[in-house]
Image (cartoon, rainbow, N blue to C red):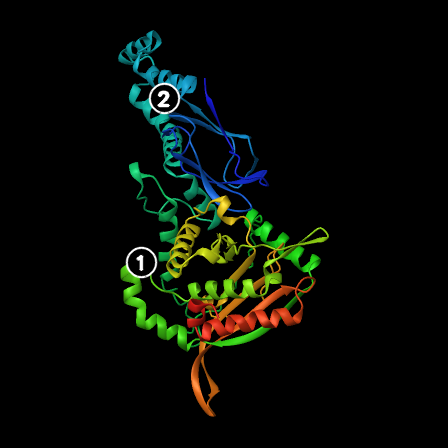
Amino acid sequence: MTIDVKVPAVGESVTEVYIGEWRKSEGDDVRQDEELVELESDKATFDAPAPATGVLVEILKKAGDRAGVGEVIARIDPSGDGGQAGESKKSVAAEPKRKQPEKEKADEKERRGEQPTAEKRQKEDAQPRDEVESETESEARIMPAARRALDDYNLDAEGIEPTGPGGRLLKEDVLRHVQQESKKEPRDEAKADGGKPAAREGTREEKAVPLSPIRRTIGRRLVEAQKNAALLTTFNEADMSAVMSLRSKYRDAFQKKHNIKLGIMSFFVKAAVEALQTIPEVNAEIRDDQIIYHNYCDVGIAIGVEKGLVVPVLKNAEAMSFADVELAIDDFARRAQSNRLKIDELRGGTFTISNGGIYGSLLSTPIVNPPQSGVLGMHAIQERPVVRDGQIVARPMMYLALSYDHRLVDGREAVTFLRRIKECIEDPARLLIEV
């Protein structure tokens, strides 16, 4: 009797997932609670564990397929021998070892010269049988992820060196082969007139890839924000000299005590908390015909990953220290890259901070993450000429952008909010004495 592998419940609003990479193939041994398959929802990517120890005898949903919560996607045989399928394979494997009476008669005829010898029959039959066995064995050595990579790059497994256990071809082997081929210098095809390389025709291939749940959710929510909110953006700039000076002065002591580097995000999170408490409208939301004011600050930190943008939330950021903020953001960033964020960590949020400066963005208009009413956009730090005490001097400057829902936040509140951010960044002592 087999045990069903079902899509687990992953959140109140999640009803469907995409099947990602299977960690095991059909016929592989699995242990209970071992990571079995990658599942991708519209909020996060996570691994589903095996419900029992045994043999993975059947995969019902392949990578890229959709599956509903509770739907059966595979089956495990807890007996450990693959059930009837395993017995059938054993019997087939054992059958050639038993010499049949017909075979004995045939051998006698061969000795009398009445029929083709075994050597002739072997020459006649060996070629197609070897081809079939070789093809089956080759298919078994190619892991599912490697097979998809071969299809993506339109490659054949022949000529690619496998490095997996038992000579298995892994996805990494295919990607390494593609990278090595791309580095090779193309041979110049000499022309008749001077040996110049012949013109090559460009490829015009197209590839259709379905939108992942994360990309679909991002698109839906951004369109929803543009459609349902009266969005407006106001700008300012901050002199980063004081923050950079503090970081330089206390970098070693901070890292020695807290085992984490002192970054600039903790300054902006603390400054945002001060501004949110000063202008509570930016920390509020419109729900039906009511304004909901939050007496806590759950600050979302936008993090870019390969599959899209995720926004884990610092819950009760007003109660967090600089070290707490830095440690939490570092943990979020590491787990976001390996798709290990939890659903609860992506829920809620009363305000969002997006740092496009790490990608070199100089200025942008971030979009509010509904139902929130505001988002702060940080940008690249650049040395720019500014006037200080009547003198033109170079200072490390950053443009700041606040996008807000004009239905709830007026221009005065938006400008005041952004100026509060600027004051706290240019004079970080304000964060300590709360002025």
Q: Callout 2, which amino acid?
A: Gly
User: Which is nearer the eye, 53 or 253?
Assistant: 253
For disc 2, the neighbor class at 10 Å (few under 14, some 14 to 19, many from 20) is some
Q: Assess disc 1: are there few (<14), some (14-19) or many (≥20) residues with their C-alpha within 10 Å of its C-alpha.
A: some
Q: Amino acid at mark 1?
A: His
Q: Residue at x 40, y 26 (%)?
A: 52
Q: Is residue 302 above or below residue 171?
A: below
Q: Is residue 203 visible?
A: no
**Above or below for 209 versus 89:** below
Residue 80, labelled with which disc?
2
Residue 310 vertical position relative to residue 49 in the rendered view, above or below? below
Q: At x 54% / y 43%, what residue is drawn?
A: 41
Residue 96 appears in the rendering: yes
Instruction: Give the x, y percent position of residue 143.
Output: 39, 39
| Image position, residue 16 (x, y; %) | 58, 39
State which quadrant residue 51 falls in: top left
Asked if the residue at tag 2 contacts the one at tag 1, i.e. Cβ–Cβ closer than 8 Å, the answer is no
Mark 1 or 2: the one toward you: 1
Residue at the spot of label 1: 258
Residue at the outermost right position: 289
Viewer-side residue, 138 vs 57: 57
- Where disc 2 sits, the SS reads loop
